[in-house]
Amino acid sequence: MTRASRLILIEKLVRENAITSQEDLLMLMEGAGMKCTQATLSRDLRQMGISRGFDGRGGYRYMLPGKEDKASELLPGTETEAITGMTWAKGLLLINTPPGYASAVAIKIDRARRYEIAGTVAGDDTILLIPRDNLSNEAIEECLSTIFQSNTLTKK
Amino acid sequence: MTRASRLILIEKLVRENAITSQEDLLMLMEGAGMKCTQATLSRDLRQMGISRGFDGRGGYRYMLPGKEDKASELLPGTETEAITGMTWAKGLLLINTPPGYASAVAIKIDRARRYEIAGTVAGDDTILLIPRDNLSNEAIEECLSTIFQSNTLTKK
DNA sequence: ATTATAAGTGCAAATATATACATTTTCTGA
DNA sequence: TCAGAAAATGTATATATTTGCACTTATAAT
């Protein structure tokens, strides 16, 4: 009913849900018995410093100030899920994981003893994978998906 | 010309200017002799995780990811002092530090989230820094000096 | 209580950003 | 080198967000 309570609801909804648009948030608010127009929402969000950012996996998401990146810390599960990103550079593959997971994932790769993979070096949240010479990036990625038997190995 | 150099320019412009819209940024890019369409820019920004937020007082502003991290004040002495040497090899940069300091320095580098730096792997007294493809060694070194020049007064 | 001032809101229109699709460019494997 | 696949890009358009304006509601001082 009052403006203050609306702001509080907005904060809660943004914190607890992956909201992708103001229309989206509007629906949730209505579901909670509190409604206003999208224009008002735009003004509310500005006042609270809530803005739309990227969730680290291609999508958009509204997030509270200071929580910009925490979205990507949501998924420490099996080793497969522990791969949060991969980047090719200089013929090497950098694999990102949540903090502390790098060595667990690297061990799994090492144990596969695949010819294509010359070796790995694990830090805390990053693994450097050194492929053997003259192999395509794709071959390595295919190799990894075999090891993890999963489709969640997305590049970029 | 190349995509990589465009991304680098974008990063630089966003870091050094108060950019309020993609059209805005587009102008600056053109002024720097590098042009593309707004659509491409939208995709570039998404890939780099650069999104529009609030500058704290009314206005909008594009900002680099994690630009509100204040918790990088963990290092004894300045990070600059903690770098005792650097060597280029195979397109990679090896950074030496006093024993035990590698990870602290690497964290600082990671947090800067510079596009030019694909990632780092830290051991105990050595950091392996992997640059993105098609960048000069000089670009990387300049990048590093920027990172360590901004916050050198860490000790509190 | 009454008037003056400020704050909040909806509506419609203006801005701004993202995306589908077609095309061009770059990359890969033979 | 060449054909096929994948990535990058522009164009046009769809989607999303912001804002000017008029109106309503709250606030404060007499």
Image: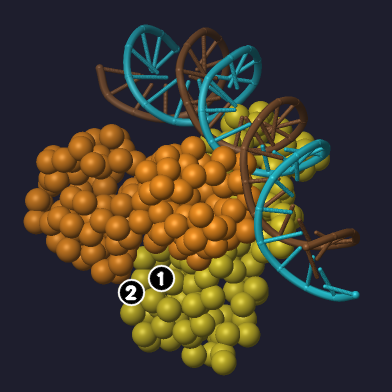
Chain colours: A orange, B yellow, C brown, D cyan
Judged left or right of residue B116, residue A88 is left
B21 relative position to B63: left or right: right
**Which residue is at a point 51% across and 82% down the rendered structure image?**
B73
Residue, x 41% and y 47% (percent of image)?
Answer: A33
| Screen quadrant of the C terminus of chain B | bottom right
Instruction: Please state the chain letter of the residue tagged with numbered disc 2 in the rendered image.
Output: B
When asked about the image quadrant of residue A133, the answer is top left
Q: Residues within 10 Å of mark 2 (few under 14, many from 20)?
A: many
Regarding mark 1 in the picture, which secondary structure is present there? strand
Residue under numbered circle 1: B127
Distance from the alpha carbon under mark 2 to that under mark 1: 6 Å
Front residue of B126/A59: it is: A59
Q: Are marks 2 and 1 in contact (CB under 8 Å)?
A: yes
Measured as percent of width and height from the top left, residue B104 is found at: 43, 78
Q: Which residue is mark 2?
A: B123
Q: What x and y, as percent, mark residue B91?
A: 46, 54
* SS for dot 2: loop
Q: Can residue A4 be seen?
A: yes
Q: Residue at x 41, y 59 (%)?
A: A12
- C7 and A114: which is toward the camera: C7
x, y percentage for residue B122?
36, 71
Q: Which mark is residue A84?
A: none
